[in-house]
């Protein structure tokens, strides 16, 4: 697949290293991983995973991915340095005034970024520095700000300037890395506007921001191709790089009876991926990467996490990726790579 896209953009995949009951990426043959030109860790580089205690680092998983990427000439994206989930409690203090708690967390943030970004400076070319820091939709009248105020980072600082700090610390730790803000739901104009407001309010380009990661957790009908295109254009117009990150197309349909069969979705998924990638190719000059959130349908977070909740047992089928549970190419794969012949 990557060879078909060599003149467009790198195509990547998120991979796991035996966490949360998932298998590790080494289960996939080189032939399958070789379809991609870039890798990102699905979990093992999140703060709570890679830096669980102040003096404890769990480098092993990320080191394995870095080594694989190096050996196979692949790019390596870093995900993620600051998030409200999968973070580490040692970075926050309950004691003292707000300014004391902010000082405490700011020092931990700096140490975390220096350690992690510093260690992978030769390997990681691009970081999701801050993940999901603005609010979702809801009743705007009740909001104090555009930001996710429930984030421990927002609470520790009392405002959103931790975002600016995270970009500054990252820029210092690796002057050459591309630094991204990454979020979902950006094809929704209201949420996108909040990200645009954040970039301006915090003057993030001056503090190191290079690009926006548009998480592509999409489905068969949402968002429309024109909304995707509009979203790419909005961030491009701000002078930012754009990457599609975390792409998966959820086929689950709650209206269909119990057992969902892949055959019910095969053609619709192929058409959907074909239209999405046609849009990406058309906008290739504005896009510097497209990353799937997974490799094959045997391993997808969508079957564990839905309705905003974690479900330990797989209770639904979603068929979101280009390779099936046995690692075979789906029709959707053809829809992505056969553009030259159609
Ligand atoms: C998900 C992983 O896929 C799961 O294994 C984990 O349990 C929770 O996080 N947005 C992100 C990703 O930025 O880090 C999330 O990954 C999916 C949503």
Image (tube, rainbow, N blue to C red):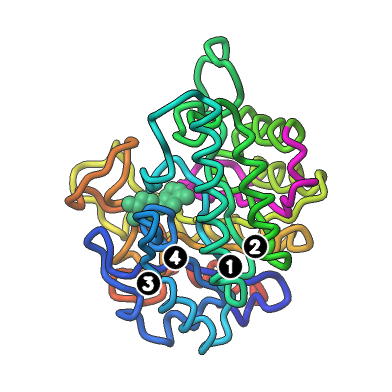
Task: Answer above or below: position of 28 versus 86.
Answer: below
Q: Which residue is mark 1?
A: 118
Quarter of the picture holding the C terminus:
bottom right
In primary-sequence order, the first of circles 2 and 3 is 3
Residue under the image location 28 percent in, 63 percent down: 19
Nearer the viewer's eye, disc 3 or disc 4?
3
Q: Report the number of discs.
A: 4
For image coordinates 77% across by 51% down, the residue present is 240
Residue under numbered circle 4: 41
Report if the CB atoms under discs 1 and 2 are less than 8 Å apart: yes
Queried whether the magenta region covers residue 221, the answer comes back as yes
Asked if labels 4 and 3 touch by Cβ distance under 8 angstroms, the answer is: yes
Query: Real-space Cα distance between discs 3 and 1?
Result: 16 Å
Residue identified by numbered label 3: 61
Q: Give the SS element for disc 1.
A: helix
Which region of the structure is painted magenta?
202-225
Residue under pointer 2: 173
Question: In the displayed structure, would residue 56 be above or below residue 338?
Answer: above
């Amino acid at each position: 697949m990557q060879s078909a896209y060599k003149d467009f953009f790198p195509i990547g995949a998120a991979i796991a290293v035996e966490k949360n009951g998932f298998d590790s990426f080494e289960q996939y043959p080189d032939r399958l991983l070789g379809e991609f030109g870039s890798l990102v860790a699905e979990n093992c580089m999140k703060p709570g995973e890679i830096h669980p205690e102040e003096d404890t680092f769990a480098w092993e998983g990320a080191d394995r991915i870095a080594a694989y990427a190096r050996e196979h000439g692949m790019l390596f994206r870093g995900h993620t340095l600051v998030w409200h989930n999968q973070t580490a409690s040692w970075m926050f203090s309950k004691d003292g005034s707000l300014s004391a708690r902010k000082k405490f967390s700011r020092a931990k943030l700096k140490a975390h970024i220096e350690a992690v970004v510093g260690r992978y400076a030769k390997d990681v070319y691009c970081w999701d520095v801050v993940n999901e820091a603005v609010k979702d939709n809801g009743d705007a009248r009740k909001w104090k700000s555009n930001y996710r105020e429930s984030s421990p980072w927002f609470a520790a600082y009392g405002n959103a300037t931790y975002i600016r700090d995270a970009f500054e610390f990252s820029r210092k730790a690796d002057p050459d890395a591309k630094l991204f803000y990454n979020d979902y739901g950006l094809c929704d104009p209201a949420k996108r506007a909040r990200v645009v407001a954040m970039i301006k309010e915090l003057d993030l380009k001056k503090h190191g921001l290079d690009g926006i990661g548009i998480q592509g957790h999409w489905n068969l009908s949402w968002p429309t191709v024109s909304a995707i295109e509009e979203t790419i254009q909005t961030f491009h117009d701000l002078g930012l790089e754009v990457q599609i990150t975390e792409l998966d197309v959820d086929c689950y349909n709650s209206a269909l009876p119990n057992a969902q069969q892949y055959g019910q979705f095969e053609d619709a998924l192929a058409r959907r991926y074909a239209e999405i990638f046609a849009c990406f190719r058309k906008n290739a000059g504005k896009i510097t990467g497209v990353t799937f959130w997974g490799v094959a349908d045997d391993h997808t977070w969508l079957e564990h996490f839905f309705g905003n909740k974690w479900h330990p047992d797989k209770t639904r089928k979603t068929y979101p990726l280009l390779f099936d549970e046995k690692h075979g190419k789906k029709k959707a794969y053809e829809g992505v790579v056969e553009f030259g012949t159609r």
